[in-house]
Amino acid sequence: MSYLLNTDEILQTIRMIDQQHLDVRTITMGLSLLDCAGEDLDQVVVKIYDKICRRASDLVAVGEAIERELGIPIVNKRLSVTPIAMVAGGCRGESLVKAARAMDAAASEVGVNFIGGFTALVHKDYTDGDRKLIASIPEALAVTERVCASVNVGSTRSGINMDAVAQMGRVIRETAALTADRDGLGCSKLVVFCNAVEDNPFMAGAFHGVGEGESAINVGVSGPGVVFEALRECAGAPFDVVAETVKRTAFKVTRVGQLVAQEASRRLGVPFGIVDLSLAPTPAVGDSVARILEAMGLEVCGTHGTTAALALLNDAVKKGGVMASSHVGGLSGAFIPVSEDEGMIAAAREGTLNLDKLEAMTCVCSVGLDMIAVPGDTPAETLAAILADEAAIGMINNKTTAVRLIPAPGKGVGDTVEIGGLFGTAPVMSVHAASSADFIARGGRIPAPLHSLRN
């Protein structure tokens, strides 16, 4: 299906790009590696490397060409692959770090920013491959540059695997320790999910789901600055006007993503998957979700009313995007990664935005507790309990939730973690001192809610 922009839309798009930080945050090629599976890890990693290099060789060049020709910034070109626990889990040996190294080398060869899919799906129980992959995560993230890892520990259908939750608390601690010389950087590339989706183009949680085809092009658009500017023009208006303004703006942003996705799909000869219309902030001033919420009348993001404002924003973004594309997917809504949003950083430093308020906000946003630095001495059981709380929100509300925690080695509340790039800067936030150890030690599975029985 062809897509045309009229003159007015072109002028609006130029203004959004030049003045309001509109960009296509990522073109992500999803790639199946199921045909690379085998028992010999050395042979498997060769297959992984060869297939990625062969199938994704033109991804970056095509993305850059589209960027030049259309004048639309495309910030990242990325890859997502079949969960490696499925591809290499049957290999002999106890470590899958070699697979991560192969992914990293291939990603470097084709020039992408990140590659996702060092992943295990254990929302109900473990396979032997899952166990090997999860045990390999800390070292894998320490010795690679571009590899991102994710683990799905719960779902509305199956409940929460609390054994996996407990283990991931320990994995996060170990990952931070192994990358202590970089402020625990490895943890910024590790996501713990409930209800993970199979077509997410955003890192660090992207993987190519088993329900996907051989390959797909998924595009993630962004545009907090565009929404912020639109809301400045309706100051004092009632909330139904605010919602309509956000919806119309999200429509325009998504149309840009649709155009880029279709063009990339055509040039690469890869099926178009989805457009993810998430408002993904950056540390740049004017590109903040927090500032959108404040534009609705909040003095500081995190004060009373923040959750209601975020609920309106998230819903309106989804409604506008769905009208603009018949292939909206991924996560789609508003992200609240603290370190990647200058308004969130400011609110956290000011003290209005804390971990408890962020947890409340995750009930109504697109993901969860994202890019949050906590004291380096936070016990693994406390980290696991935070994961469990967030998984429970996802399970009960039938939505995706995700957690990226960074226990900053050697740092405490009030210190700053310098991650750099799009990951930004994270103020270390406090956690509750009371222990959750006995709770986490129970293990087992928290049963699925009654509304999971829909058949």
Image (tube, helix red, strand yellow):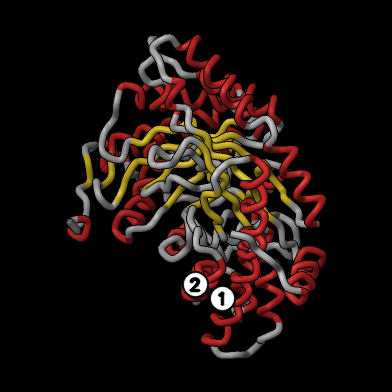
Residue at position x 69%, y 25% in the image: 109
* Spot occupied by residue 335 in the image (x, y as percentages of width and height): 55, 58
Element type where label 1 sits in the image:
helix
Q: Which residue is mark 2?
A: 319
Toward which corner of the image does residue 123 lie, by quadrant? top left
Q: Which residue is mark 1?
A: 247
User: The N terminus lies in which quarter of the figure?
Assistant: bottom right
Report the disc number at residue 86: none
**Residue nearest the viewer, comparing 21 with 58:** 58
**Residue nearest the viewer, comparing 136 with 416:** 136
Q: Kindly tell me whether residue 371 is visible in this rendering.
A: no
Are the residues flagged by discs 1 and 2 in contact, CB closer than 8 Å? Answer: yes
* Spot occupied by residue 402 in the image (x, y as percentages of width and height): 45, 49
Element type where label 2 sits in the image:
helix
Residue farthest bottom in this picture: 237
Residue at position x 60%, y 53% in the image: 220
Q: Amino acid at mark 1?
A: Lys
Q: Amino acid at mark 2?
A: Lys
Residue at position x 55%, y 49% in the image: 272
Please, is residue 65 above or below residue 168 in the view?
Answer: below
Q: Kindly tell me whether residue 384 is visible in this rendering.
A: yes
